[in-house]
Amino acid sequence: MVLIKGGWGAVRSGILPWVCLAALLCGCGTTNHVYVHPLADMTAAKKAVVLPFYNLAGNAKAPVIIKESLVVEILNSRIFDVVPESQIEAFLREKRIEAGRFLTGEEMKKIQEQFGADIIVYGTIQVYDEGKPEINVVSKIIDIESGVTIWTADIGVVGTSDLPTFGIGETTSMKRLVQKLTAKTVRAMFKRGRAARRGYGGDGGGK
């Protein structure tokens, strides 16, 4: 299913980078920058593949934590379905696809054929600082059929540093911060979609 109405709106290169925005959107902190392709119809998506997030933050557990929270928020939104993680992991192992390398057009076509997915969600974790605490993630959505990036968001959140002893407060604070970030990310994805389904204009944003 092509999510771009009336044409491509972008050049297909045949090779699609997982993390091409890392160099372009290098700002961190409490940023909230969202781009939606002007020809994209987000409500047309029925199923998504969420790939592992590339990790620039230096925290080994960050990709799993961010991805799991994001999937939960997407499913709770009930806008579209998500392919189970176990199936995606098996596919990535079989094809030897690692976070940070490129997806070819052929690989994306195989993802579409095997899982019936319309879109791919992936991104880059730029900051995951438990001490501050602070998180910054750049997320993207690609329409599989056309290979066009239809949505990009650079979302950052900062928590409080006055934490209880023994690390208990720190863990709780980071969990809340992760949930806040992924919830903001999903609202940014679908506020336009919800408005469109109700027949209203929608601003495509969300905070």
Image (spheres, rainbow, N blue to C red):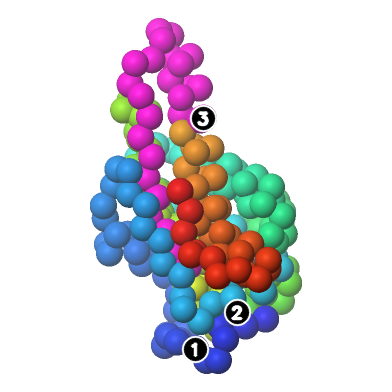
- Mark 3 vs mark 1, CA separation in Å: 39 Å
Confirm whether the magenta stretch covers residue 201: no
- Where is residue 71 shown, x and y percent of the image? 62, 49
- Indicate the position of residue 32 as horizontal and vertical percent values: 37, 52
Q: Amino acid at mark 2?
A: Leu
What residue is drawn where x is 69% and y is 60%? 79
Residue 200 shows in this picture: yes
When asked about the image quadrant of residue 163, the answer is top left
The total of numbered circles placed on residues is: 3
- SS label for mark 2: loop
Residue 181 pos. (x, y %): 47, 43
| Mark seen at residue 8 | 1
Spatial separation of the CA atoms under disc 1 and disc 2: 10 Å
Circle 2 sits on which residue?
A: 3
Q: Of helix, strand and loop, which one carries label 3?
A: helix
- Residue 34 versus residue 86: which sits nearer the camera? 34
How dense is the environment of label 2, judged by Cα within 10 Å: few (below 14), some, or many (20 and up)? many
Say the numbered circle drawn on residue 175.
3
